[in-house]
């Protein structure tokens, strides 16, 4: 359990520092995917489906949501 916590925190740190050169659209898409992954994991745990399946579905839905939100924000400025 402790190793998973360290691995998760290391991955979060790596992702946070890796976002410096990304555009706002890329950051929104990645943020949506990360939030979706966490929500999918929780949903998978609650519903009894595979947590991996929940994470994959959540990541896809979150990335799509982040992308769509970015397009909305781009059009809002016009």
Image (tube, grey):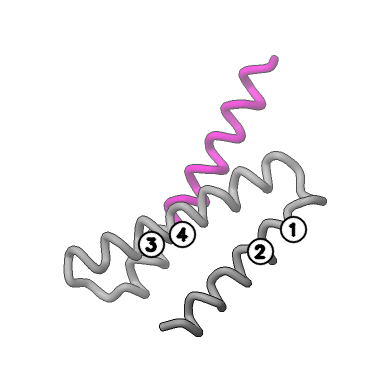
Residue drawn at x 50%, y 84% as measured from the top left: 3
Mark carried by residue 59: 4
Residue at the farthest front position: 2
Residue sitting at 31 percent across and 73 percent down?
51
Assess disc 1: are there few (<14), some (14-19) or many (≥20) residues with their C-alpha within 10 Å of its C-alpha: few
Q: Which residue is at a point 68% across and 17% down the rendered structure image? A: 77
x%, y% of residue 66?
A: 54, 43
Which residue carries the number 2 mark? Answer: 13
**Residue 9: percent from left, percent from top:** 57, 69
State whether the magenta stretch is mostly helix, strand or loop: helix
Q: How many marks?
A: 4
Residue at the spot of label 3: 57
Which marked residue is nearer to the observer: mark 4 or mark 2? Answer: 2
> Considering depth in this image, is 62 or 31 the residue closer to the camera?
31
Q: Find out whether the residues at labels 4 and 3 contact each other: C-beta distance under 8 Å.
A: yes
Identify residue for label 1.
Answer: 17
Local crowd size for mark 4, using a 10 Å CA cut-off: few (<14), some (14–19), many (≥20): many
Q: Which residue reaches farthest right?
A: 21
- What is the CA distance from the residue labelled 1 to the residue labelled 2? 6 Å
**Residue bounds of the magenta highlight:** 59-78
Nearest to the eye among marks 3 and 1: give it: 1
Displayed quadrant of residue 39: bottom left
């Amino acid at each position: 359990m402790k190793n998973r916590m360290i691995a998760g925190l290391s991955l979060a740190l790596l992702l946070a520092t890796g976002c410096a050169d990304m555009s706002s659209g890329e950051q929104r898409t990645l943020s949506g995917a990360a939030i979706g992954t966490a929500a999918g994991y929780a949903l998978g745990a609650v519903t009894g489906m595979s947590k991996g399946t929940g994470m994959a579905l959540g990541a896809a839905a979150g990335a799509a949501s982040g992308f769509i939100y970015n397009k909305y924000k781009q059009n809002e400025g016009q």
